[in-house]
Amino acid sequence: MTTLDNQIEQIVYSRPASFTDATTHYCPGCTHGIAHRLVAEVIDEMGLRERTIGVASVGCSAFSYNYFDVDFVEAPHGRAPAMATGIKRVLPDNIVFTYQGDGDMMSIGTAEITHAAARSENITVIFVNNANFAMTGGQMAPTTLPGQKTSSSVHGRDTRQSGFPVRAAEMLATLDGASYVVRRSLHDPKNIRKAKKAIRLAFETQVRGLGFSMVELLSTCPTNWGLSPKEALEWVEEMMVPYYPLNDMKVHPEIANLSNERTGG
Amino acid sequence: MPKELIKGNIAFAEAAIRSGLQAYFGYPITPQTEALEWMSQRMPELGRAFVQAESELAAVNMVYGAACTGARVMSSSSSPGVSLMMEGMSYIAATEVPMVLVDVVRGGPGLGNIAPAQGDYNQIVHGGGHGDYHPIVLAPASVQELIDLTAQAFDLAEKYRAIVVVLIDGSLGQMMEPAELPPMRPVRSSVPEWAVHGAHERPRRILTSIYINPPDMETLNMRLLRRWERIKAAEVRCREYYLDDARFAVVGFGTAGRIALSAVRMARAEGIPVGLLRPITVSPFPDAAVSELARQMDGLLVVEMNSGQMLEDVLINTQGRTRVEFYGRTGGMVPLPDEVLEEIRRLAKSADSSVQAEGHPRDRWLHRMKDLNL
């Protein structure tokens, strides 16, 4: 790049400082990469990189620690909120977030996430819901939609045999300890911008010491859904959003005020 | 510090606090609950971390998280709860972070009962969680020893970035004895060079147990094993009683060892030249000391509150060089000194009669237990 170019060009988009240079292992069309980027941008914008500790989970996001340039630990399957509790209780001035999929958080880790929220642990949870166990090859998860075909529900999820999906955000929002619980989607640019704002508010909740915050992100899994990346985005909008409404389930008044100030609302 | 009358569960909890404990995570389970109750009051008043977790699974993972920050951290539980902790302990071992656990063993298997037992020796000493790893296991036999070993457990755990389990049983947890607590040590303010603390003016750190490439996982396994060899060379401890002129020796750890000591004294009063070897570290096991007994003694009696778990570790070292007998009570039953004395008499008599012992010591014991309708 020449000096002249530097004077003319204005960088409007670059890799977040909270990202490493690693190339992600995620499949083409998977929205994990977008979710990662939104978290990294928020950490950058809030100046939190040097005091953030991430807690990775088990599933496709197991290797998320390779992509964030922050201190990281890797939790056993489902236990990320418990590990985050241990970290946050001894380092209350650090920023601690977990990054968990739906198999990890809403199947094997239901107890840990529920009680972390009930205790109002001052942590932030990024919950990526793609309606299946993706890492192991697309088995049915508690979040799999009724009738959805997976490798362990080949004729479609039969609710008589395997029950009904769990709406994590709605469930956790019933707990008094939950301070900020919302659901967003990553299926188009407008929703991605809304997701980023929610992630920002979730981290603001923690920075202000207001307690448990979680953003559920509806996410694609084109490989295991057997869809093209474009079809997968459409599937999120047409199939997942109606079942998993994009709402603010619980917003602490201080965060609601902050949100209104920022949007001028 | 003056001696005070103190209950085992509270003694180890307070000993840990005075050793600079920064965080405790646990779950109520009999017969260790007094420790959790004590921590719930003492830790917050000292401005330290305490959480009553939703399960032992969560508790051990809170320990894991806090250990990754370099904090001095522990949990305590009893047999069924420790089974739930095995997942986390395997991860902690693989991540090479220090952890202290006090296991107040009760009668099992299953829900079992809340009486004292040693049935979890194999689970604790020989791993328990998945994969290749070795915890250091300390086995006190009195409240004072429980206090002293709990305090030392943290130094050992941090020295070797390893798991240290203080293995006791329900009777030691519940027993009150005069004992001296250590003076209050300050909480450590330095952060180990491996700990996660936020990547401030240094490259980021990652603490994980994933080594997705098998050659890397093998490297970790070999590193853990070489560290274990160093621990075996430096940290084996046991106590010997009346062994100098003995022809026979009893081997027992913890409460079983303490009961055996009473029986040994009674046998000595009858003129039987018997002593006691009480392993303090059951892991690493005092191989050399037992091997030496095999060379010197006319017979050994292993006494446990299980069906002969440590017995196997003794037999590996005796290699048929001396007669070995076993006596145990299981499922929460505690052997009385008289029972052990009778076994010592039998050992002394049979060794002198030069009748060869047939089969495995456990089989001979099982046969004898028929007399008790067991």
Image (cartoon, grey):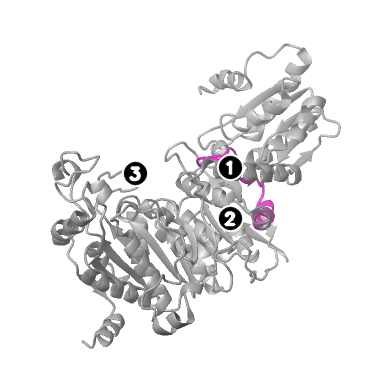
Q: Amino acid at mark 2?
A: Val
Give how far across and how far down residue A30 sits, in percent: 29, 56
Residue drawn at the location 52% of the way across and 68% of the way down: A90
Q: Secondary structure at mark 2?
A: loop
Q: Amino acid at mark 1?
A: Tyr
Q: Secondary structure at mark 1?
A: loop
Q: Which residue is mark 1?
A: B133
Instruction: Identify the magenta region.
Output: B126-154
User: Relative to residue A25, is residue B216 depicted above or below?
Assistant: above
The circle drawn on residue B97 is: 2
Work out whether residue B304 or residue B264 is closer to the camera in this orientation and state it: B304
**Disc 3 crowd, CA 10 A, few/some/many (<14, 14-19, 20+):** few
Q: Which residue is mark 3?
A: A136
Q: CA distance from mark 2 to mark 1?
A: 13 Å
Give how far across and how far down residue A17 sits, in percent: 45, 72
Q: Amino acid at mark 3?
A: Thr
